[in-house]
Image: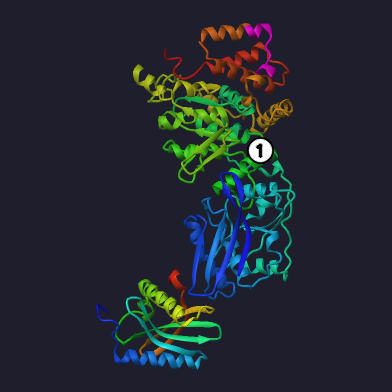
Amino acid sequence: MGGGYPYSTAEGILAEYRAGVLMQEKGYAVVARNVNYPKVGELDLVCLKGKLLVVVEVKYRSDGEAGDPIEAVTPSKIKKICRATEKFIAENSFYDYDVRFDVISFRDGVPEHIEDAFYGVWGV
Amino acid sequence: MLASIKSYALDGLNGYPVDIEVDTQKGVASFEIVGLPSAAVKEARNRVRAAIKNSYFDFTPKRTTVNLAPADMKKEGSAFDFPIAVGFLASTEQISTDRLKDYVMLGELSLDGSLRRVSGVMPILIAALQKGYKKFIIPEGNAAEASYIRGIEAYAPANLADACAFLGGFKELAPVKHRLYSSAAAKNKYDVDLKYVKGQSLAKRALEIAVSGGHNLLMCGAAGAGKTLLAKCIPTIMPDMTFEEAIETTKIHSVAGILDPEEGMVTVRPFRSPHHTASLMSLIGGGSKSVCGEVSLAHNGVLFLDEMPEYNKKTLETLRQPIEDGVVTVTRVARSIEYPARFMLVASMNPCPCGNYGSRDKNKQCTCTYLERKRYVGKISGPLLDRIDLYVAVDGVEYDELRSSPEGESSADVKARVERARAIQRARFASENIHVNAEMNNRLIEKYCPLDAASEKLLEQAFLRYSLSARSVTRILKVARTVADVDGRESITANDLAEAIRFKTREPGNEID
């Protein structure tokens, strides 16, 4: 990724849009997209269902590339997401909510939703 | 919400209660364990998460803090997994909290939610019972240990789900059945027997005396003479353990994690034979956790040192204090723990480096120089030799003797005599808090080893002739007492004393000068 941040391709933007649709179909309300806190981190999708706040990380891999997209969610990435989430909760007063972290990965254009993909600051 | 679970931890052989407080809050999930957890305790969170999920409970991420109080004691081991998991379920209101405070919980969790055996349950149960805790939930694998303790109500569920169903009142579990200790449980599981040891009548006599009175024994003889075989026979003639002795030894073995899960109790006297490369700490105990060593594992049993001069000299010297005191205090910066170490020392050695010195065989004559022999024997220091009550030379047997058909006395016969001698000692020391003659202190020697005039004269002569030390004299008196007990005599005769002196004064190196 280097210094440019965030840098998205057209496919990436489309994937994030499709992920939002998928979450809505599953009964979640999308409350925020692409929340970006410079030098802290970025949240692709923030959804809500009852008293549960779900932070979704969208991972897109164009075909031909090796490896599971979920592998791209590294410990350092998790740390960033957690910090960003804490900031998001503080700014929007979501204090009284359980927080869950999901990953929606696209492989060959097929979405896969992994609930509770990682456990907060504890890591994978 | 907050939940508090009672558990227990060990500091050496003494247990202390640990309150496990689990607090869950909303927010970005985390799982912190505080209260000086060691690495194994910290890893509990991974096992707890997997076990809860695989037991079909809800593990919605929470901001979780687990506190192990008292927070200033270092917590070791994996026995907190189960109480932490129960605490989490209680604080997230998945199980009712009504019955939680009644129980002390222990257990390691497997990832599939089943409860695994942990070490040190026996001393924990005993310590907790003394503090007034009576109800326990322990892993199924530890049920055997708990079954011997009277007055407790222990439940041994197979897994987390069962335990929670029990705590919630949805399922009844039968408490672990109380078992009575019986020394008959110590079935004869040895593949050696004294009757297969040909000849060696003197050595056998020495073994019998040593085992009867718990005296230390050094066997000295040429290579292949049968020292190790004789030593291996010792467990077969050792008297059965009394319940108190068995509990003492089981506590140590439980902490060390070498207890047989089926048996649940050490019913056979331990026979520990560390290799001569054994390190100092493995023998005495130590390390950052102040774990117990071989001397403590041999408590109420035998510590056998084969090829004694081959041991590191420093290692051997450290044995001096436990031999004398019967306890070893392992002190490290963090903590200091006293382990019992009342063992019978049995050692074997060659008389010289080539192993043939003193052999009857003309073709196997010693090729060592005087100095070599001297140096070899000198590896065992005088103070250590002084603490050994019986020296016996084990010489090779003749061909006729070796191939002779009539078998000697069997171990069972000798054991019967040893049992009788021990019974006499038990009756004698009923009010003295010791078990065997070897443990007598000076006051008791004064009281129980009176000598007649002839014996007194003999002892005086021996004292002058062999330049005996004060300790040697007390040791001779103790052995003489045992000889009289073995032969069933009320008082010590001059013959008993002579035998004791004979065994005491034939130390290796003595014949060289």
Q: Amino acid at mark 1?
A: Glu
**Residue at image x 54%, y 35%?**
B328
Q: Is residue A74 left or right of residue B41?
A: left
Q: Residue furthest left?
A: A3
From the viewer's side, name the closer residue of B254 and A45: A45
Magenta-span inclusion, residue B446: yes
Residue B404 at what x, y percent from top left? 57, 27
Q: Where is the C terminus of chain B found, in terms of image quarters?
A: top left
Q: Is residue B145 above or below residue B458?
A: below
Q: Is residue B273 visible?
A: no
Q: Residue at x 36, y 83 (%)?
A: A36
Count of numbered circles on the image: 1
Q: In the displayed structure, does residue A66 sit left or right of residue B27?
A: left
Q: Is residue B251 magenta?
A: no
Q: Residues within 10 Å of mark 1 (few under 14, many from 20)?
A: some
Q: Chain of mark 1?
A: B
Q: Is residue B353 above or below residue A53?
A: above
- Magenta segment's dominant SS is helix
- The quarter in which the N terminus of chain B is drawn is bottom right
Picture coordinates of residue B335 (x, y %)? Answer: 51, 42
Magenta residues span B445-456
Residue at horizontal 69%, vertical 46%?
A: B130
Q: Position of residue B363 (x, y in %)?
A: 39, 21
**In this figure, which residue is indicated by the disc labeled 1?**
B245
Q: Quadrant of residue B414?
A: top right
Query: In terms of secondary structure, where does tag 1 sit?
Result: helix
Q: Is residue B452 above or below residue B396?
A: above
Classify residue B409 by image quadrant: top right
Q: Nearer the viewer, residue B512 or A105?
A: A105
Q: Coloring scheme of the render?
A: rainbow
